[in-house]
Amino acid sequence: MFPWNLFPFHNNNFQKMVSGMKPEEIDQYIQDIMKKAFQENFGSMMNPADLAHGFPLMNNQSPRQTNSNSSSKIQAAVFETHDYVYARIPVKDEEWLKQLRVYHTSNQLILEHVPEYDDKETITLPAIVKRKGSTAQYKEGTLEIKIPKNIDMQYSEIDVKEIY
């Protein structure tokens, strides 16, 4: 439940305070309250700056989940939406597209033959994906791979026993 009690809208003094503020001050005040509300209730799950400035991908900022393995030759940005998992791969040379092979399992994306022919890169996906329906699109130096998510509703209970 959203903590509406953090917002002082029901207070009569709030009306007087807001009427004397400039629009920039009101904006800053609202942003400060939103930061406090989301930091207390959601911890580090969400960056409050994203709320004030839109989602990271809409502002050409890098997404939060990236493949930052130090031995990795390809820095792929991987993120998910409600229905899809996206991987954005910067392509330094368009010749890569001629030799590139892209595969995926239910939880991994596999890139072969880039940057060198003998190279193989495995990227762990943030969600389980479907076998079919994937698309890849190259535009402005970036290869974007879109894979539909698979909703796995099969749960298995694990019996926990005490061992003395």
Image: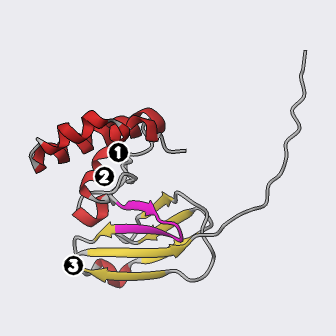
Tell me the number on the disc at residue 50.
2
As drawn, the residue found furthest toward the top would be: 164
Question: Which residue is at 42% across, 61% downward?
Answer: 78
Pointers 3 and 2 in contact (C-beta within 8 Å) = no
Tell me the distance, in whole angstroms, between the alpha carbons under discs 1 and 2.
Answer: 6 Å
Q: Quadrant of residue 152?
A: bottom right
Pointers 1 and 2 in contact (C-beta within 8 Å) = yes
Tell me the distance, in whole angstroms, between the alpha carbons under discs 3 and 1.
Answer: 28 Å
In the rendered structure, the answer to whether residue 122 lies left or right of residue 70 reads: right
Residue in front for this viewpoint, 5 or 132: 5
Q: Quadrant of residue 121?
A: bottom left
| Residue indicated by mark 1 | 47
Please say whether residue 135 is visible from this viewpoint. yes
| Residue indicated by mark 3 | 140
Q: Earlier in the sequence, mark 3 or mark 2?
A: 2
Question: Which residue is at 58% across, 70% downward?
Answer: 149
Residue 71's spot in the image, x, y percent? 37, 48
Q: Earlier in the sequence, mark 3 or mark 1?
A: 1
The residue segment tinted magenta is: 76-88
Q: Quadrant of the N terminus?
A: top right
In the rendered structure, the answer to whether residue 94 lies left or right of residue 111 reads: left
